[in-house]
């Protein structure tokens, strides 16, 4: 019995620590400045106020939010399409140079993004794409070797000869991919989508480097610079944080099963 | 027919191959070449031979940055790996509410690092922050955390531990569930104590998982940037100026792209070295299926 209490005690404490910062975001976002000063951080301010959210949404923030949504949507769409294409070819088509190319992809999985930041910026500068949507999206929209590796593993797991009947009926590779293989790939597609959405939504360093104007500024960059102003207004920052976190929490609630499975899929074999 | 099938495949691969060549391979070549040049953007680059590397050899600040990064990695990785493994062992039992706990522990992983950096800024606030407020309740005066050169780096590392422990826990959980029950039964028949079962059965069989977790976490931790940017901006007195932050500053604040490239090569070499050591270490004990 004591063992059980100890177990649940530990787990509850851990879960509390995991969730506490989120709780803080929510509580603070709905506090007035005076409530912020007069209450402990973990005590809700009563009555709650929506003034911070209103103030934030009345300024430039919605633009940055829209930019983030757009960036996430385009990156996810591009990565899904191009990753699936490449993974399909590597897994189910035979062509000259397949092994060499695949090992090239696997080798580039090892390239740390921090190391390519400077040359990527210089490439974009040379192409006059600094501070443009093209520059922001180009390096990541064509798919990542990591995602391709993942999807390829999944495609290879599908039974051999699945395509034979369709091929005899004269279906081309694109038709085989979209009509026969993709419907069987829903778990893998779901996983890839979630990984891409999260990493695009949260991305910071590349947007920070490549964008400067309001037209391409994303939320993470806006929030980080909001923090740099004189006299940090925590309520306002937390209101922004809340807006940034809500979609992630929603994804989490709706796709829990996929997320857990995605980890199993990415981690082993 | 063969050329036609090939042609299709190349079409499918084309876009991603462009990406790999233009945005991964070409940048690696550029950063390598640039590390032998002086370039401050306004004037054309000039060949510098080994100047940048000589400068690096005598540049105490850069070595300090690398050292800070290593300390950061050593603060994060053992702690979050052990915690993740312990949590996974606790949650690999048939107990009530196990799913809820699993989910709650993964929640931090989804958080935008920038936002969480900002939240933790405030949790670490010396006067109004949650940690020092809680410490005050029990009569302890907490340190100034982020404005204290001793505590700033551990504080940033703690955020990383918070963010990734639950995520890693899921990998271990998946690994644990892949261990056949018969092995435990056999061990029990042979009279193995729970402790022996852990060290002799569980841990060796978790080797592929451990390998994956260690490699990916180390590669990530060596490149830490976001949390440092919002929490400490490298300070106080450069005590959190990790190498990726140093590279960023050298390039985009001092516009010294040649030297920043040399620093990038240093980071690349370190990450490659650390990864290869792990491949060696784990490779002896595990077969990792890449095919």
Image: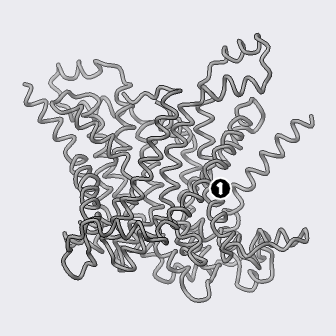
Name the one closer to the observer, A54 or A74: A74
Which colour style is shown?
one colour
> Does any portion of residue A134 appear in the rendered image?
no
Residue A136 location (% of width, % of height): 32, 66
Residue A123 location (% of width, % of height): 23, 66
Mark 1 residue crowding within 10 angstroms, few (<14) / some (14–19) / many (20+): many
Q: Quadrant location of residue A35?
A: bottom right
Name the one closer to the observer, A266 or A189: A266
Quick one: quadrant of the N terminus of chain A?
top right
Residue A191 location (% of width, % of height): 46, 42
Q: Which residue is at 70% across, 32% downward?
A: B92
Q: Which residue is at 34% across, 52% downward?
A: A77
Name the one closer to the observer, A103 or A230: A103
Name the one closer to the observer, A80 or B208: B208
Q: Quadrant location of residue B51?
A: bottom left
Residue B209 location (% of width, % of height): 55, 34
Q: Which residue is at 70% across, 43% downward?
A: B100
| Secondary element at image label 1 | helix
Is A83 rendered above or below residue A138? above
Q: Chain of mark 1?
A: B
In the displayed structure image, the side of residue A138 where residue A202 appears, left or right: right
> Does any portion of residue A180 appear in the rendered image?
yes
Number of numbered callouts drawn = 1
Is A263 rendered above or below residue A62? above
Q: Quadrant location of residue A86?
A: top left
Q: Which residue is at 22% across, 51% downward?
A: B21
Q: Which residue is mark 1?
A: B162
In the displayed structure image, the side of residue B160 where residue A24 appears, left or right: right
């Amino acid at each position: 019995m004591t063992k059980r209490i100890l177990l649940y005690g530990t787990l509850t404490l851990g879960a509390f620590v995991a969730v506490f910062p989120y709780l803080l975001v929510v509580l603070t976002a709905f506090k007035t400045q005076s409530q912020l000063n007069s209450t402990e951080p973990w005590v809700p301010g009563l009555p709650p106020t929506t003034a911070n959210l209103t103030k934030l949404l009345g300024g430039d923030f919605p633009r940055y939010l829209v930019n983030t949504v757009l960036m996430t949507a385009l990156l996810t769409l591009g990565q899904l399409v191009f990753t699936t294409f490449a993974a399909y070819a590597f897994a189910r088509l035979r062509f000259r140079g397949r092994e060499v190319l695949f090992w090239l992809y696997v080798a580039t999985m090892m390239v740390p993004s921090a190391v390519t930041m400077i040359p990527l910026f210089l490439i974009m500068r040379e192409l006059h794409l600094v501070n443009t949507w093209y520059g922001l999206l180009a390096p990541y929209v064509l798919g990542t070797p990591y995602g391709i590796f993942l999807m390829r593993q999944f495609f290879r797991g599908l039974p051999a000869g699945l395509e034979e009947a369709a091929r005899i009926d004269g279906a081309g590779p694109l038709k085989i991919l979209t009509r026969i293989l993709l419907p069987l790939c829903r778990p893998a597609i779901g996983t890839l989508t979630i990984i891409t959405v999260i990493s695009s939504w949260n991305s910071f360093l590349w947007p920070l480097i490549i964008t400067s104007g309001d037209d391409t500024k994303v939320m993470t960059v806006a929030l980080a610079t909001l923090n740099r102003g004189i006299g940090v207004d925590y309520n306002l920052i937390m209101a922004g944080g809340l807006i940034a976190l809500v979609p992630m929490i929603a994804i989490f609630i709706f796709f829990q099963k996929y997320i857990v499975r995605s980890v199993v899929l990415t981690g082993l074999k | 027919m063969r050329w036609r099938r090939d042609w299709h495949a190349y079409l499918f691969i084309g876009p991603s191959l462009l990406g790999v060549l233009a945005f991964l391979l070409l940048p690696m070549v550029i950063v390598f070449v640039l590390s032998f040049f002086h370039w401050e953007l306004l004037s054309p680059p000039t060949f510098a031979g080994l100047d940048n590397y000589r400068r690096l050899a005598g540049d105490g600040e850069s070595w300090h940055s690398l050292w800070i990064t290593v300390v950061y990695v050593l603060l994060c990785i053992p702690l979050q790996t052990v915690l993740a493994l312990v949590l996974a062992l606790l949650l690999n039992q048939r107990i009530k509410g196990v799913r809820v706990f699993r989910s709650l522990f993964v929640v931090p992983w989804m958080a935008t690092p920038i936002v969480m950096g900002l939240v933790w800024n405030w949790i670490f606030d010396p006067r109004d922050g949650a940690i020092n407020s809680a410490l005050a309740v029990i009569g302890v005066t907490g340190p100034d955390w982020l404005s204290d050169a001793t505590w700033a780096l551990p504080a940033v590392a703690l955020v990383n531990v918070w963010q990734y422990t639950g995520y890693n826990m899921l990998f271990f959980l998946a690994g644990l569930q892949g261990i056949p029950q018969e092995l435990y039964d056999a061990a029990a028949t042979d009279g193995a104590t729970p402790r022996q079962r852990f060290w002799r059965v569980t841990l060796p069989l978790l080797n592929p998982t451990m390998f994956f977790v260690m490699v990916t976490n180390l590669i990530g931790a060596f490149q830490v940037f976001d949390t440092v940017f919002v929490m400490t901006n490298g300070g106080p007195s450069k005590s959190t100026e990790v190498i990726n932050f140093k590279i960023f500053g050298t390039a985009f604040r001092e516009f010294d792209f040649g030297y920043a490239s040399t620093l990038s090569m240093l980071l690349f070499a370190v990450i490659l070295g650390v990864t290869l050591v792990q491949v060696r270490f784990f490779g002896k004990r595990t077969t990792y299926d890449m095919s």
